[in-house]
Structures are given as structure tokens and as C-alpha cells.
């Protein structure tokens, strides 16, 4: 991400309502977003698109889990940050054990403020100031 350039965020969730909510919130916060309904669609987008700064992904999706998608994308984008959105954070730690550097999670459902704060912390290391 270059100074003055909007961070590029790939949003992947099998639930249309969640995808649209996350997209609306992050676009209104000034981020550039792209959407995918599942892991294979996200991988296809990444083949033809410039690198993303952040992956916002549901942990439990059919076809490919969010942590598997993150692992695969980091093979070509090692600096990719990851925000897991999950309705079952207990399972996240049961399956994954620990979060790596550059990873965080928020519970579903989350507020717009929590989402923007989590994204900001991952991307720039601080919470945006309130006007």
C-alpha cells in the first residue's frame, strides 16, 4: 500500500448479507474492496487482480475454509493480513491453535465500528480518530 492509496481488501463470505455489510462498511471507511462468495472464487480474483493488503474472510465456508484460503493466498502474497469473521471463535482456536502475526478475528455479528477498528489495527496499527 502506497501513501495516499486506499488499502485493497478482499472480502470472502458465503453469506451474501455479511459480504454486503462488510463491503458497505469498509467502502464508507475509504477502503477499496472486492467480493467473493467462496475460496475458489477468491483465488480466481487474485489471479487477475493486483495484490490485496487484507483478506476479510469467514472461517467456516463450504468448499474451502477461510484459514486454508489465507494460507494459499499468503504463498503468493506473504504480506497479506487476515481478519477472520466467525460465529464460532472457540472453534477458530480449536482448529487453528493460534493466530499468526498479521491475523485477528471478530465475532459474528459485529458492529460497523468494531469492524473498522479491527481493519485499521491490522493495516496501520492504530484505531482511526473520531471526527
Image: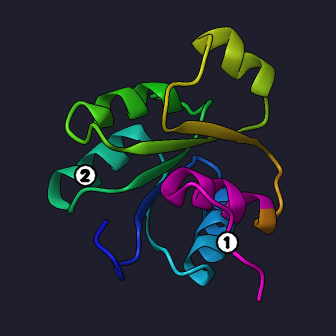
Mark 1, other Cα within 10 Å: few <14 / some 14–19 / many ≥20: few
The tag on residue 128 is 1
Residue farthest to the bottom, as pictured: 131
Give the residue number, with chain letter if any, for mark 2.
Answer: 46
Residue 50 in the image: state x and y as whole percent.
Answer: 20, 62
Q: Residue at x 25, y 52 (%)?
A: 46
> In the figure, is residue 53 to the left or right of 16?
left
Where is residue 112 drawn, in percent x and y? Answer: 77, 67
| Mark nearer the viewer, 1 or 2 | 1
Q: Is residue 10 left or right of residue 58?
A: left
First along the sequence among labels 1 and 2? 2
| Residue under the image location 44 percent in, 53 percent down | 54
Question: Observer-nearest residue: 21 or 124?
Answer: 124
Q: Are marks 1 and 2 in contact (CB under 8 Å)?
A: no
Residue at 58% of width from left, 46% of height from top?
14
| Res 96 → quadrant | top right
Residue 7 location, x and y as percent?
41, 68
Q: Is residue 32 above or below residue 4?
A: above
Boundaries of the magenta span = 114-131
Q: Secondary structure at mark 2?
A: helix
**40 or 50, which lies in front?**
50
Q: Quadrant of the C terminus?
A: bottom right
Of residues 6 and 26, the one drawn nearer to the viewer in this rendering: 6
Residue at coordinates 66% horizontally, 73% vertically from top-left?
25
| Alpha carbons under labels 1 and 2: distance apart | 28 Å
Amino acid at each position: 500500500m502506497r501513501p495516499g492509496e486506499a488499502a485493497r481488501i478482499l472480502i470472502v463470505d458465503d453469506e451474501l448479507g455479511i459480504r454486503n455489510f462488510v463491503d458497505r462498511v469498509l467502502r464508507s471507511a475509504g477502503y477499496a474492496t472486492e467480493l467473493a462468495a467462496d475460496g475458489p472464487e477468491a483465488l480466481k480474483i487474485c489471479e487477475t487482480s493486483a495484490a490485496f493488503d487484507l483478506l476479510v474472510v469467514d472461517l467456516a465456508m463450504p468448499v474451502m475454509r477461510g484459514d486454508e484460503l489465507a494460507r494459499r493466498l499468503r504463498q503468493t502474497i506473504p504480506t497479506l493480513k487476515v481478519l477472520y469473521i466467525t460465529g464460532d471463535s472457540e472453534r477458530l482456536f480449536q482448529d487453528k491453535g493460534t493466530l499468526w502475526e498479521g491475523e485477528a478475528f471478530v465475532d459474528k455479528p459485529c458492529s460497523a465500528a468494531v469492524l473498522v477498528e479491527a481493519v485499521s489495527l491490522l493495516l496501520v496499527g492504530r484505531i482511526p480518530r473520531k471526527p
